[in-house]
Image (cartoon, rainbow, N blue to C red):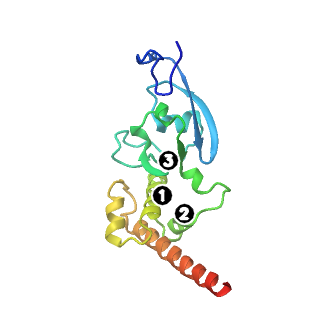
Amino acid sequence: MSNTSNGKMADGLPQVVRRDERQCVTLTFNGRERSAYCEPRDLLSDFIRHELGATGTHVGCEHGVCGACTVHVGGVAARSCLMLAVQAQGQRIDTVEGLAPDMVLGDLQEAFQRHHALQCGFCTAGILMSCADYLQRVPDPSEAQVRDMLSGHLCRCTGYTPIVAAVLDVAARRRHRNVTGDALEASHA
């Protein structure tokens, strides 16, 4: 009998996978198609670190509380310790390494550096990924909104104030760039 795309056999019965059987997972990882093998019980966070070799994603609590393992799944921030690697099959996964694909810091990373928004750095990758997602959805946040978004992360070093300042700085610079860019386009029209 042949498999169908929904994990069931052609006769409609669920496909049985043995616990120690490794499966190939193919996904788009930071813009490149990648494949690696994992056990069905492996977490996405472990798959990213151990099978794909991207160690920027950190594993903290392994319960989805601390946010250190935050990545983008299909363009949306998600805790990689709460997702199985096999669930990422065919998905687009972006990690902190994808924020600087050519080893050039993005505006959010530069703002974190400028505002000293990191100290030990353990939580920083997850916070950056949440902030990147948030600024895509809410390009002009208030301080209260940024603090609310950050409440899903645990950082023991910074006190959050420099992180909030960095996010607000990026939002303001992007607004200014958009206004300036719109004005330039209008003058050339």
Q: At label 2, which amino acid type do we have?
A: Gln
* Left or right: 76 in relation to 35: left
Which residue is at 52% across, 76% downward?
173
Residue 38 drawn at (x, y percent): 53, 27
Quadrant position of residue 50: top right
For residue 135, above or below residue 185: above
Quadrant position of residue 142: bottom left
Q: Residues within 10 Å of mark 2 (few under 14, many from 20)?
A: many
Query: Does label 2 or label 1 sit earlier along the sequence?
Result: 2
* Left or right: 168 in relation to 180: left
Q: At label 1, which amino acid type do we have?
A: Leu
Reading the image, the residue beneath label 2 is 109
Question: Of tags 3 and 2, which is closer to the observer?
Answer: 3
Query: Does label 1 or label 3 sit earlier along the sequence?
Result: 3
Q: Which mark is residue 128?
A: 1
Q: From this viewpoint, is residue 65 visible?
A: yes
Which element carries disc 2, helix, strand or loop?
helix
Which residue is at 36% across, 42% downward?
61
Q: Nearer the viewer, residue 79 or 120?
A: 79
Which residue is at 36% across, 66% downward?
146
Reading the image, the residue beneath label 3 is 74
Q: At label 3, which amino acid type do we have?
A: Gly
Quarter of the image with the C terminus in it: bottom right
For residue 181, above or below residue 102: below
Measure how far apart labels 1 and 3 are at the Cα level: 16 Å
